[in-house]
Image (cartoon, helix red, strand yellow):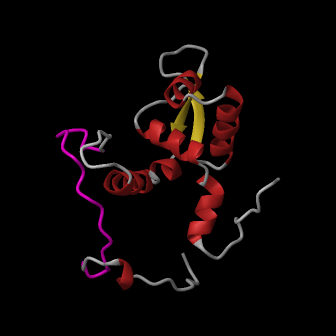
Amino acid sequence: MKRKSLAGNACPIARTLDLIGDWWSLLIIRDALEGISRFSDFEKSLEIAKNMLSTRLKGLVERDILCLVPASDGSAYKEYVLTEKGRALQTVIVALSQWGGEFMFEPGEPGSVMVDAQKRQPIRKLELLSADGRVLAPDDVATKLAVEH
């Protein structure tokens, strides 16, 4: 059964989910943000079947989230590198990680946490801020149709 495309939807969340809405794609992006770039390393990290990984990587390249470049070590291999569009998903990955860390683990259960690479300290919890700098709660946010982007 083929899933319905949300590409023409007026909602940016729907369009984004249409682009990267399966868990494998988000985990590939997570790994790419951590510096993984080779097919075999993605396969090892994710424990995913080769055909599934190949399909996801191809789709992320087609959608300009990843690009294929010559291997950094000069070998005949190709590497998958995040594009600017792909790197911009880091905030989404951090938000998912912080939400999951807060709500998906039992007290005392070990889990990973994202840290500042330089100082090795946990990243401050993301907050929604208004244009004038106020912290916004869920009830303070609404959606409106935007004419321009």
- Which corner quadrant of the image does residue 126 belong to? bottom left
- Residue at figure coordinates x 53%, y 39% from the top left: 28
In the image, residue 115 lies in the stretch drawn in magenta: yes
- Residue at figure coordinates x 58%, y 42% from the top left: 24
Give the residues in magenta.
Answer: 114-133
Seen from the viewer's position, the closer of residues 52 and 120 is 52
- In the rendered image, residue 127, in percent from the top left (x then y), is placed at 29, 67
Q: Is residue 113 above or below residue 39?
A: below
- In the rendered image, residue 134, in percent from the top left (x then y), is placed at 24, 80
Asked whether residue 82 is in view, the answer is no
- In the rendered image, residue 97, in percent from the top left (x then y), is placed at 38, 50
Q: Main secondary structure of the magenta part?
A: loop
Horizontal relation, residue 145 to residue 103: left or right: right
- Residue at figure coordinates x 32%, y 40% from the top left: 112
Q: Is residue 145 above or below residue 117?
A: below
Q: Is residue 32 above or below residue 95?
A: above
Quarter containing the C terminus: bottom right
Residue farthest right in this picture: 1
Residue farthest top in this picture: 75
- In the rendered image, residue 143, in percent from the top left (x then y), is placed at 50, 83
- Which corner quadrant of the image does residue 43 belong to? top right
Asked whether residue 40 is in view, the answer is yes
